[in-house]
Amino acid sequence: MAPSYALERLLSAGGSKTVAGIDEVGRGAWAGPVAVCAVVTDLSEPPAGLTDSKMLTPARRVAMAAEITGWAAGIGYGEASCEEIDELGMTEALRRAARRALAALPVRPDAVILDGKHDYLGAPWPVRCEVKADLSCVSVAAASVIAKVRRDAHMASLGFEEYGFADNAGYPSPVHQRALAERGPTEHHRLSWSYLDDLPRWRHLKRHRNPLTGEGQLGLFG
């Protein structure tokens, strides 16, 4: 099913002249920032084949991102670092990244569509949460592609070939897991994540945070 403008038009009919679609990437990674993209459109015909970034091959995502950049009325991109994630927890890190993305738009939107169930953005933004909006909503689908392509490029630029960042973008993979066990975490790793509990040699590096401020993470071998 191709995404449509049904939700953008619904919000516009309710008085929101400018609507931004938002999506994030990197929430479940063990290394690197969490990234958020906000996209505003003029309700014109989107690039052919636009859909959730996870439905596209890496090469097609890069090509689609270039098309979106030339088509969208506005694109804003924001990140929150691994240090912010460790210190503040994922919800607050997402909020900061989303606010940075919105601040980077050329126009302040009147309403925001967030992919998923939970409003991590909050006031003063009027937010509409929509499950699978990256599949059903044009602006969110576009945001999902830009967020994925830009964050992937950032992770590839870090080097650390032994950890496979160019291929896994900081997410757990066999190469990443082996490198962590042998070499330990880099300065780009999230040190509050529970994967360190499964690494006896490096467990002493774990940063502890009030458990009420963040989300639990899967263990390395769980």
Image (cartoon, rainbow, N blue to C red):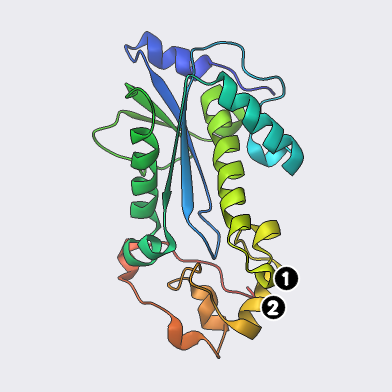
Alpha carbons under labels 2 and 1: distance apart: 6 Å
Q: Residue at x 57, y 73 (%)?
A: 219
Give the residue displayed 32% in from the left and 61% down from the top: 88
Which image quadrant is residue 199 in?
bottom right
Amino acid type, label 2: Arg
Q: Say which quarter of the image contains residue 77.
A: top left
Residue 135 seen from this side: yes
Q: Secondary structure at mark 1?
A: helix
Q: Quadrant of residue 74?
A: top left
Neighbours of disc 1 within 10 Å: few (<14), some (14-19), many (20+): few
The residue that mark 1 highlights is: 174
Asked whether the beta carbons under mark 2 and mark 1 sit within 8 Å of each other, the answer is: yes
Read off the residue under disc 2: 178
In this view, 81 is above or below 122: below
Query: For the point 66% across and 26% down, which residue is it?
Result: 50
Is 218 drawn above or below residue 113 in the view shown? Answer: below
Name the kind of residue labelled 1 in the image: Pro
Q: Is residue 55 above or below residue 207?
A: above
Q: Is residue 92 left or right of residue 42?
A: left
**In the rendering, at what x and y percent does residue 109 appear?**
34, 23
| Picture coordinates of residue 66, whole percent (x, y) | 64, 30
Q: Residue furthest left?
A: 124
Residue 2 image offset from top left, x and y in percent: 67, 22
Please state if 221 lies on the left or on the right of 133 as rendered.
right
Residue in the foreground of this view, choosing between 187 and 18:
187
